[in-house]
Amino acid sequence: METEHLVIADYFIQAIEQAVYQEGERLPSESELREQFGVKRSVARRAVARLCDSGWITTIQGKGSFVAARSTPLAYALSSKTAFTEEMMKNGVIAHAELLHWEKRTANQHERRLLHLDHADWVYQLEIRRRAGRLPLSMTTTCLVERIVPDLELHLDPFVSLYRILSGIYRLQPQRLSSVVRASLPNADDAAQLEISAQSPILQVESLVSHRGIVPIEYSRSRIRGDLQESCVSFS
């Protein structure tokens, strides 16, 4: 596998992190990269594309590539009682949640196993986009046990906070039982919703949530922008 473009990209990432190149400063052109590193034009182009896709630089046609402004990642604690709105408040950021789609359907095999359901049991599936201020931060597909949250659709408009509905309407006390975190790349739909390129890294977090640590009530799969959040696992 060709790795020359990765070496060049990593060189400039380190240079930007060490403030050798400042925000808004122009990077060498593809021709200058070819001469500096002794590589083909295609390698230089791939290095620039990688830096652009990962948010380190922006390119302006006819002018060149420039060091991009980078937001400080938001700290997000993964614990048994993690809630998005509260975590954003700790960062001094206003949280917004948008319900993009919902449906009621029978649970699939994976959901039945995790949520301890029978073949005849139903779930509500919600697609939620969450924002930190104006920036789209995450996409979450969440499945809730229908018999635990009956008539959920009556409480989805206006939609502000899922956990506010669970605690306020259904008197549930959501508690995270487990989370599996892995690095990934977004699919085309998620990239569009999160306003990132298809090559920008994301964190995928699959979580199982219970009521008071006993009865499983929710299975969710979140896709989080890697450039905007850093996760901290709490053992307390």
Image (cartoon, rainbow, N blue to C red):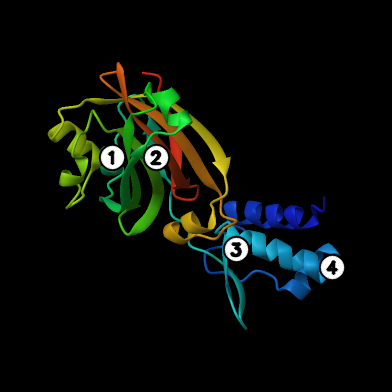
User: What residue is at 71 percent from the left and 61 percent from the top?
Assistant: 47
Q: Which mark is residue 40?
A: 4
Q: Classify mark 2: helix, strand or loop.
A: strand
Name the residue carrying label 3: 52
In the structure shown, which secondary structural element does the residue marked by tag 3 occupy? helix
Q: Secondary structure at mark 1?
A: helix
Q: Name which quarter of the figure residue 174 lies in.
A: top left
Q: Is residue 18 left or right of residue 190?
A: right
Asked if the residues shown at circle 2 and circle 1 are in contact, with their CB atoms under 8 angstroms apart, the answer is yes
The residue lying furthest to the front in this view is 120
> Of label 4 and label 2, which has the lower sequence position?
4
- Comparing 9 with 126, the one in front is 126
In the rendered image, which residue does mark 1 sit on?
Answer: 90
Residue 139 at x, y percent in the picture: 40, 48
| Residue bearing mark 2 | 75
| Callout 3 amino acid | Cys
Binning the other alpha carbons within 10 Å of mark 1 as few (below 14), some (14 to 19) or many (20 upward) gives: few
Q: Mark 4 touching mark 1, by CB under 8 A?
A: no
Give SS at disc 4: loop
- Which is nearer the N-term, disc 4 or disc 1? 4
Q: Nearer the viewer, residue 174 or 14?
A: 174
Q: Return the disc, 3 or 1, that comes first in the chain's sequence.
A: 3
Left or right, 113 with respect to 182, comes to: left
In x, y percent, where is residue 154?
15, 45
Q: Residues within 10 Å of mark 4 (few under 14, many from 20)?
A: some
| Residue closer to the observer: 16 or 200 | 200
Residue at 29% over, 19% down: 215
Looking at the image, which residue is at 29% across and 52% down? 99
Which amino acid type corresponds to the residue marked 2 in the rendered image?
Ala
